[in-house]
Image: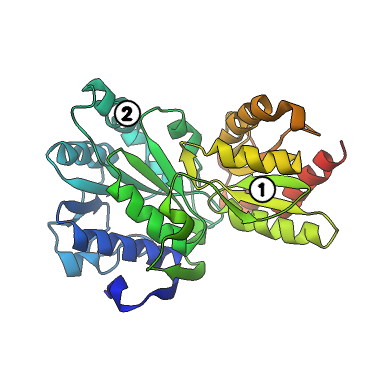
């Protein structure tokens, strides 16, 4: 495992960037340790933790039993004892056995103890569909956790952000969930190890592409789809500003408000079901803050309100470029 000191920039996949971030945190702080199912000798299902057990040992990169509740519960205990555990949940749909530990215990302990005890647990959660997998391997449960006060939630769409936001999550004194877009694990881009850039403030959204006619809000794997939609729209003379949310809790509403006031129209796109999805909170809050600027209702594009479908038809469920552009056309027609 090379250290980041050896090179200022490098082209990595998102999975490799996360691996490097974990390695650098393990090297810089002996209180950091990793645990999860098959993360050690196997290197994880997606090989994101490959090589880390060999470098740092089985006491710091721990292959846990198949018990998500146990992984989270043990992580809470380790955090209370002064460690900074990083827990991996193997797939998004496997998080529910640990849901009670996360929402009833981890998220509330800091407040319950009146701030006397910090619980710096980081939970890595590969999420989202599009990989042709089986049941419980393609879900987008972010709204269940953004509704829970006490959790910070980050996601990313580039290798640069994957590296720096992973490190920021581990260093946070609050519990942090890292939603890793699994179908983007192998997407390559440049990581600048010498300068975090916009990732210096992990809780802020970034404008991934400037535009004038409409704001498109996306995050995770949908950012690439949103950028492709903006490029296609540009060929038709439509200028779309793409905002990558990055932080799902807290949400950087100031950046969204500034963009919406410039463009006066907005579409929010996410993989999760539109019904009860995070896009509803974004639309409601920005309608309140920007009502007199709006030229059209804020539109939402997302998955259908159904159990996640079989892999053969999942691409009919996940929003694609055409569904986003349909929403853009409808919004611009007002």
Decide if residue 243 is on the left or right side of residue 170. Answer: right
Q: Are marks 1 and 2 in contact (CB under 8 Å)?
A: no
Give the alpha-carbon distance from disc 1 to disc 2, as whole Å. 30 Å
Q: Is residue 65 visible?
A: no
Q: Is residue 315 visible?
A: yes
Would you identify the image quadrant in which residue 67 lies?
A: top left
Residue at 27%, 73% in the rendered image: 3
Decide if residue 233 is on the left or right side of residue 315. Answer: right
Q: In the displayed structure, would residue 286 be above or below residue 52?
A: above
Spot occupied by residue 327 in the image (x, y as percentages of width and height): 77, 43
Residue at 23%, 36% in the rendered image: 119
Decide if residue 269 is on the left or right side of residue 240. Answer: left
Residue at 79%, 60% in the rendered image: 234
Residue found at the very far right of the displayed protein: 333
Of marks 1 and 2, which one's residue comes earlier in the chain?
2
- Mark 2, residues whose alpha carbon is within 10 Å: few (<14), some, or many (≥20)? some
User: Which residue, given by chain and number where applicable, does mark 2 sit on?
Assistant: 100
- Mark 1, residues whose alpha carbon is within 10 Å: few (<14), some, or many (≥20)? many
| SS of the residue under disc 2 | helix
**Quadrant location, the N terminus:** bottom left
How is the protein colored in the picture? Answer: rainbow
Spot occupied by residue 131 in the image (x, y as percentages of width and height): 53, 58
Would you identify the image quadrant in which residue 308 lies?
A: top right
User: Which residue, given by chain and number where applicable, does mark 1 sit on?
Assistant: 319
Depth check: give the residue in front, 152 or 262.
Answer: 262
Spot occupied by residue 165 in the image (x, y as percentages of width and height): 40, 53
Spot occupied by residue 200 in the image (x, y as percentages of width and height): 41, 54
């Amino acid at each position: 495992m090379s250290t980041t000191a050896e090179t200022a920039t490098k082209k990595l996949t998102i999975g490799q960037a996360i691996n490097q971030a974990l390695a650098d945190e393990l090297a810089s702080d002996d209180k950091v340790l990793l645990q999860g199912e098959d993360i050690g000798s196997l290197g994880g299902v997606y090989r994101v933790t490959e090589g880390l057990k060999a470098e740092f040992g089985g006491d710091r990169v721990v292959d846990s039993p198949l018990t998500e509740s146990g992984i989270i519960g043990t992580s809470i205990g380790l955090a209370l004892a002064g460690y900074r555990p990083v827990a991996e949940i193997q797939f998004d749909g496997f998080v529910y056995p640990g849901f009670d530990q996360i929402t009833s215990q981890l998220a509330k302990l800091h407040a319950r103890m009146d701030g006397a005890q910090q619980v710096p647990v980081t939970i890595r959660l590969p999420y989202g569909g599009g990989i042709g997998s089986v049941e419980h391997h393609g879900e987008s449960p972010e709204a269940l956790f953004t509704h829970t006060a006490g959790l910070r939630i980050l996601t990313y769409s580039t290798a640069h952000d994957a590296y720096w936001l992973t490190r920021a999550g581990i260093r946070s004194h609050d519990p942090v969930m890292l939603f890793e877009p699994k179908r983007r694990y192998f997407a390559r881009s440049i990581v600048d190890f010498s300068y975090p850039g916009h990732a210096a403030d992990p809780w802020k959204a970034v404008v991934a592409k400037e535009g004038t006619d409409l704001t498109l809000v996306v995050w995770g794997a949908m950012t690439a789809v949103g950028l492709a939609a903006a490029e296609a729209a540009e060929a038709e003379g439509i200028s779309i500003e793409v905002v990558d949310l990055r932080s799902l809790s807290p949400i950087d509403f100031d950046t969204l408000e500034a963009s919406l006031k410039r463009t006066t129209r907005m579409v929010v796109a996410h993989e999760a079901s539109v019904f009860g999805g995070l896009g509803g909170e974004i639309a409601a809050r920005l309608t309140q803050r920007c009502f007199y600027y709006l030229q059209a209702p804020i539109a939402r594009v997302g998955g259908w309100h159904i159990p996640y479908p079989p892999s053969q038809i999942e691409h009919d469920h996940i929003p694609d470029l055409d569904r986003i552009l349909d929403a853009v056309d409808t919004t611009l027609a007002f």
